[in-house]
Amino acid sequence: MLYLNLKTVLEARQIVKPYAFLVKIGIAPHTAHKILNNDTHVMRLDNLNLICKALYCQPNDLLAFKQDLNAPVENTHPLIKLMPTETNIDWLHQIKTMPLDKLKQISQLLNQNENQE
């Protein structure tokens, strides 16, 4: 079953008030509540567009897949790639505790990436 895995992206973007964030970008309060409680069975593309623009991501970053025990898919099915893995993106802590030379290397990589786009 596909579902929105918004929590991971919100945490990566350091958004601590997801409901207020969704309403601020133009999602209706009732819809924001349903999205955050994984009670969304239908997602309007314009809402998905708003979320992706605001979070600077693509829909695939938000979609996740959970096996349905009544109708499982094979391990070779492409949906399996959407199964979430446990990742803790605490970049702020990592940056605060990183040696200065490593920060300089990361900054150089980011600048190179920016220049390539």
Image (spheres, grey):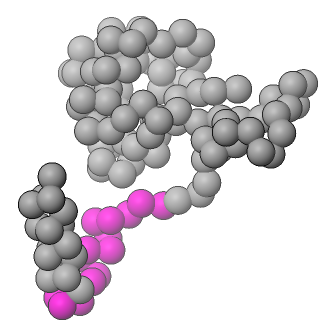
Magenta residue span: 88-101
Q: Is residue 114 above or below residue 62?
A: below
Q: Is residue 23 visible?
A: no
Q: Is residue 77 magenta?
A: no
Q: Residue furthest right?
A: 70
Q: Is residue 93 magenta?
A: yes
Which quadrant holds residue 53?
top left
Considering depth in this image, is 66 or 11 the residue closer to the camera? 66
> What x and y, as percent, mark residue 72?
85, 32
Q: How many marks?
A: 0
Considering depth in this image, is 88 or 75 the residue closer to the camera? 75
Give the residue at x 42% y 60%: 89
> What x and y, as percent, mark residue 103?
19, 81
Q: Is residue 25 visible?
A: yes
Give the residue at x 70% y 26%: 1
Q: Residue furthest front?
A: 116
> What x and y, as percent, mark residue 41?
59, 12
Q: Classify residue 71 as left or right of residue 33.
A: right
Q: Is residue 46 above or below residue 58?
A: above
Q: Is residue 27 above or below residue 105?
A: above
> What x and y, as percent, mark residue 69?
87, 31
Q: Is residue 68 above or below residue 91?
A: above
Give the residue at x 77% y 45%: 76
Considering depth in this image, is 5 or 57 the residue closer to the camera? 57
